[in-house]
Image (cartoon, rainbow, N blue to C red):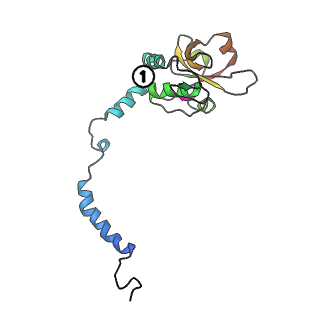
Amino acid sequence: MPSNGGVWQPQPCALLPVALSFMLVFGCSRLTPVPRYTGAPQSAVTAELIRRRSADERRLLRVVDRYLGVPYQWGGTTRRGMDCSAWVRAIVRETYGIELPRTSEQMFTVGSFVPHAQLQAGDLLFFRDTDAVSGVSHVGIYVGAGRFAHASVTQGGTIAQLSSAYFSARYVGARRLPR
């Protein structure tokens, strides 16, 4: 006699074939293919991502304009305060639909090297904040005409001249994102 007082209890493995049969008969009859497999028109989200990948300088400038004046906050990632990498990351995501790594040092490994003479709007620019710091410690985004947008410690989101004495002395290089 079973130890549970004579009441039969099915073993979990015994129910598996019954559950699978039920799922096959009733569950699969209600499945519909995901739209991407049916030849249906693209979803609005997909269409937007494709449009962003081919964004032009005007779109970049419109997005940058919405971030101008956002206060600088080291480690900040919201519009209440952002550091340089979070600021550039937000602009690139909104403009091109590309997700970047979190830090400027990590961003410096993304994309391909671009010579200074071949800069295009959307290229990421990298700097050393001080002569004592080795490697990359600041990032901005080229907006054209010798200017770049970045999150300044003193001004927050702003646009500056790449040829200024301060930035030209600290310029490390540029990277172009794949689009």
Q: Is residue 111 above or below residue 9?
A: above
Magenta region, residue range:
68-79
Dot 1 lies on which element?
Answer: loop
Q: Position of residue 37 (x, y in %)?
A: 30, 44
Q: Main secondary structure of the magenta part?
A: loop
Q: Is residue 7 above or below residue 39?
A: below
Q: Is residue 4 above or below residue 35?
A: below
The quadrant in which the N terminus is found is bottom left
Mark 1 sits on what residue?
55
Q: Quick one: label 1, few (<14), some, or many (20+) residues within 10 Å?
A: some
Residue 17 located left or right of residue 157 = left
**Residue located 56% across and 26% down the image:** 82
**Residue located 68% across and 21% down the image:** 129
Residue 172, image quadrant: top right
Residue 18 located left or right of residue 67 = left
Q: Position of residue 11 (x, y in %)?
A: 38, 76
Q: Position of residue 89 (x, y in %)?
A: 52, 28
Given residues 16 and 58, the one toward you in this image is 16
**Residue located 24% across and 63% down the image:** 25
**Residue farthest front in this picture:** 5
Decide whether residue 28 is among the magenta residues: no
Instruction: Work out whether residue 176 can be spotted.
Output: no
**Residue farthest right in this picture:** 132
Residue 108, image quadrant: top right
Q: Amino acid at mark 1?
A: Ala
Q: Position of residue 36 (x, y in %)?
A: 32, 41
Instruction: Work out whether residue 29 can be spotted.
Output: yes
Residue 58, image quadrant: top left
Decide whether residue 70 is among the magenta residues: yes
